[in-house]
Image (spheres, rainbow, N blue to C red):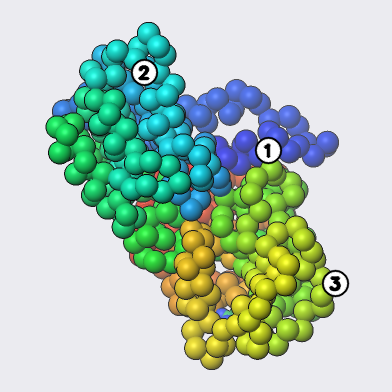
Amino acid sequence: MLHRSTVLIAKQYRAPSEPRKSHILVHVLNNHYFSAVANPPNQKNPGSDVFMKRALELASRSAGNASPNPMVGAVLVHNGRIIGEGFHKEHGLAHAEVNCLDNVSEADKQLIPESTMYVNLEPCAHHGKTPPCALRLVQEKVKEVIIANADPFEEVDGKGFEILKSHHIHTEQGIMEKEGLWLNRRFFCFHQSKRPYIVLKWAQTAEGYFAPLDRSRYQITSINSRQLLHKWRTEESAILVGYQTALNDNPELTARMYSGRQPLRIVFDRTLQLPLTHNVFNNAAPTWIVNDRLDKEEGNVRYVQILFNKNPLTQILEKLYESNKLSLIVEGGAVLLESFIREGLWDEARVFTGQASMTEGVHAPLLTGFKKAFESELGGDTLNVYVNKASKYKYITGMEL
Ligand SMILES: NC(=O)c1ccc[n+]([C@@H]2O[C@H](COP(=O)([O-])OP(=O)(O)OC[C@H]3O[C@@H](n4cnc5c(N)ncnc54)[C@H](OP(=O)(O)O)[C@@H]3O)[C@@H](O)[C@H]2O)c1
């Protein structure tokens, strides 16, 4: 089955020889998304799933831009009619609830005190870069606020509900909670597990090989899959590769085939052997060189010193947590990916199987303790997405990555 996000990529980036993907197909898949995430109707608040679904859809528009904030969407409804919508576009800009209220027309403003707001996350209660949203809802006298997820961020953590309740605004929480958890899994993992959400990514041949035996650079996937990877890079806070990959492949580790934020690049280089002429030292993105001898900053490059004989992965994850990085995508090589798998330090794995063929080579990592989320096809490659069985954030059929 084709997954929605992969179809969108296929539509955008089409090699000249490939047949054109149908726009209708995208529509079908859009509808599939909405029908697939439909829950049994909420008895207390009929129609609330439709409006929460819309709030989640609005929230998802800020993928890659909201971090370290969560993705939040809000819909204001009066007698079954949407009178306002908004989402948190970018870290530092107005929150979803404020944009939603600001978007209500002059004619409909008088209806706000008789309206219900659907918002996927508990309204904030603290002065961050913007004033507390809960106070704005009080000020506007919104009648009722329906919420998918409580906010685990310690400055909020129930305080948003308290403000609303103390001003007699009716609140209800838990509508489409699982969908909300999946959407904001990076944010929830960061605050609940105190580490970034970890995505493993690799490509393998049909025979299960990862690289040639001499560990030279070898292209396994199609250009469509590579563009999808660049999209993924814009959605994660940081990207990590092992020393051999940085040395042999000389990757740039940036999103060049998709517009968006550049993630922090991180490379293992224990004894600082990587030539300074290698691409990871260019100015295209902030970079950490993880080593055992130097702790200093030079332009966009930070040399991060750790103790290599004492849980190196945990030390890096701690440093990422301290730096407010919500997520990490690990892109190889096999030694590095296997160390994450061995320690159970992963949440999601995205594995491309390309059409390239090898009769011998380095074996692809062996994933254990997983549940398959879905399979899709892209440019002749197969993409399999797995979720760690132990993860609190379960994939919901039909939702996007
Ligand atoms: N198919 C794919 O998706 C894909 C993706 C990336 C790369 N590749 C290919 O994979 C090959 C390179 O992979 P590889 O497995 O040989 O090497 P690698 O994982 O890129 O690098 C291994 C080195 O990184 C450091 N390292 C890795 N994990 C570590 C950990 N947990 N703690 C501390 N240091 C760690 C170690 O360096 P020290 O020994 O110096 O301490 C280790 O020797 C290349 O051929 C590349 O083209 C394929």
Quadrant housing residue 277:
bottom right
Residue 203, x across and y down, in percent: 66, 61
Residue 344, x across and y down, in percent: 44, 73
For the residue carrying disc 2, how many other residues have a C-alpha within 10 Å: few (<14), some (14-19), or many (20+)?
A: some
| Above or below, comparing residue 341 to residue 153 in the picture | below
Q: Mark number for residue 29? A: none
State the count of labels.
Answer: 3
Query: In the figure, residue 115 lies in which quadrant?
Result: top left
The residue drawn where x is 32% and y is 32% is: 136
Q: Amino acid at mark 3?
A: Thr
Q: Residue at x 70, y 35 (%)?
A: 12
Labelled disc at residue 82: 2
Q: Secondary structure at mark 1?
A: helix
What type is the residue that disc 1 sits on? Ala
Label 2 CB-ligand 1 distance < 8 A: no
Quadrant (top left, top right, bottom left, bottom right) of the N terminus: top right
Q: Which residue lies under the disc numbered 3?
A: 277
Disc 3 to disc 1: CB gap under 8 Å: no
Q: Nearer the viewer, mark 2 or mark 1?
A: 2
Dot placed on the residue nearer the N-terminal end, 2 or 3:
2
Q: Is residue 347 visible?
A: yes
Image height check: is 210 above or below 137?
Answer: below
- Dot label at residue 10: 1
Residue sitting at x 77%, y 61%? 283
